[in-house]
Image (cartoon, rainbow, N blue to C red):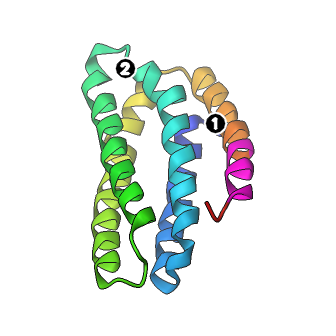
Amino acid sequence: MKTITEALKDHHDEMRDLMKKIDKDPENFILLKKNLDVHHELEEDLLLSELNTMDDVKKESLESQEEHYVLNVLLLDLADFPKDNYRWKVKMGVLEEILNHHLDEEEEDLFPEAEEKLSKTKLEKLGKKFLDLKKKRLEMALETKDL
């Protein structure tokens, strides 16, 4: 059974792959946005809510949430910006840079701390819940792909 940190890392890799697809076809952007929307919500509700209660990892956990906010602002801006405008690619480059920094920081700093602080049983329970909810929520979100 996957732990939540393993499941989140796998989803990070899926988003890295989506970034490459957007380079080839900007219409793939909506897939990234919907994946990130689901990912941020579940990561905050399942993992970060646990870490926010622990003094020695609270700062790192809250920083991750603040980065989610910044990414969401960029995603909303890109969703409403014409994809055929030259600046859209520039904005997309900024998103990619910030997203890659965020994903790397979580994987290198936050996830190892979570693995240290939470029991294997708890990490696996959260991992199962993340995978179940991710599947359901992405299915629903992708039904409205054009929105």
Mark sitting on residue 130: 1
Of the 4 image quadrants, the one containing the C terminus is: bottom right
Q: Is residue 137 magenta?
A: yes
Q: Which residue is located at x 27 percent, y 76 percent?
A: 90
Left or right for 4, reference 116 = right
The first of marks 2 and 1 along the sequence is: 2
Q: Is residue 60 visible?
A: yes
Quarter of the figure with the N terminus = top right
Label 2 sits on what residue type? Asn
In-front residue for pair 147/18:
147
* Residue 85 placement (x, y as % from top left): 35, 83
Instruction: Give the answer, above or below, for where 85 lies relative to 106.
Output: below
State the CA–CA distance, disc 2 to disc 1.
Answer: 18 Å
Report whether 142 appears left or right of 44.
right
The quarter holding residue 110 reads top left
Tell me what residue is drawn at x 64 percent, y 65 percent: 146
42 vs 57: above or below: below
- Amino acid bearing label 1: Phe
Q: Which residue is mark 2?
A: 52
Q: Which of the two residues, 102 or 86, is positioned nearer the viewer here?
A: 86
Q: Main secondary structure of the magenta part?
A: helix
Boundaries of the magenta span: 136-144
Counting every numbered tag in the picture gives 2
